[in-house]
Amino acid sequence: LHKRLDLRRWQAFVRNAKRLRPGDRIDFGAGVFAIAEARDEEGGFSLAFEGEEPVEVLLERAGRMPLPPYIAGKRAADERDRADYQTMFAEKDGAVAAPTAALHFTPELVMALAETGIATERVTLHVGAGTFLPVKAENTVDHKMHAEWGSISEDVAARLNAVRARGGRAIAVGTTSLRVLESAADDEGRIHPWTGETRIFITPGYRFRAIDGLMTNFHLPRSTLFMLVSALMGLERMQAAYSHAIAHGYRFYSYGDASLLLP
């Protein structure tokens, strides 16, 4: 449902969902209506859309590009955002936001990397609404991660395993890629073909199995993503990196600066 609703409308919908009851009829505008069915344990609802049109058609009609709230709060989405807030790797519908570390990449950059012997592989993880939720629990054990759907093909898994077997490194571009790779890896670090939902929550103390480094943007405090990078690099080192970034005017979030983290 929410993959193409702008975030202000989606956040309002989530707030209102607390007051929704099974059987309520929701008007999304543009002639799109849905009936609230059952509430899940995370507070969301499954919806039954009215009519015979595919839900993808309804989303295109009633939805807008889901820009991050710190952008959407200042201006409405426009046609240029459809290109700007999209990575060159995008192929499948399903995410509520762009995996922003990949926004740094262009075809020219990928070609330059290939010329130095650095290959690029593609995996899929649909960024979910939980990405935008801060951790409110005092103990991370009590925090419930939202499920996100991902997929790794047999060919990609085989090539990644071969690179690492001969002493190469697998560098995840973004926490999204890292999470799906770690979800597909066994205890020996071998990546398997994989399709399904993951709720993996990576915090300090986690033993990484599938990756040897990470390229990522600078993230919000108290977020699951900052916890992930702290698990990879150590909390003290990441706090020092963030202090440096703040002191030197680095840009954070979706169109922000990137860091290459090599533990």
Image: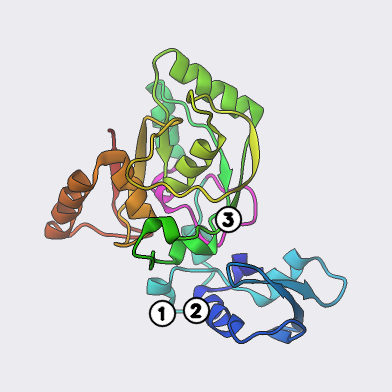
Q: Is residue 200 above or below residue 138?
A: above
Give whichever of 117, 215 is nearer the camera: 215
Q: Amino acid at mark 1?
A: Gly
Residue 6: x and y in percent read 54, 74
Q: Amino acid at mark 2?
A: Arg
Dot placed on the residue nearer the N-terminal end, 2 or 1:
2
Residue 186: x and y in percent read 53, 29
Marks 2 and 1 sit apart, C-alpha to C-alpha, by 7 Å
Q: Amino acid at mark 3?
A: Ala
Residue that badge 1 annotates? 73
Marks 3 and 1 sit apart, C-alpha to C-alpha, by 26 Å
Q: Is residue 46 above or below residue 110?
A: below
Dot placed on the residue nearer the N-terminal end, 3 or 2:
2
Image position of 123 (left or right of 196): left
Local secondary structure at mark 1:
loop
Image position of 7 (left or right of 139): right
Residue 212 magenta-highlighted:
no
Mark 3 neighbour density, 10 Å: few (under 14) some (14–19) many (20 or more): some
Q: What residue sits 48% from the left and 68% below the top?
A: 67
Q: What residue sits 74% from the left and 81% below the top?
A: 22
Q: Are marks 3 and 2 in contact (CB under 8 Å)?
A: no
| Viewport quadrant of the C terminus | top left
Residue that badge 2 annotates? 8
**Rendering colour mode:** rainbow
Give whichever of 8, 225 is nearer the camera: 225
Local secondary structure at mark 3:
loop
* Dominant secondary structure, magenta: loop
- Nearer the observer, disc 3 or disc 1? 3
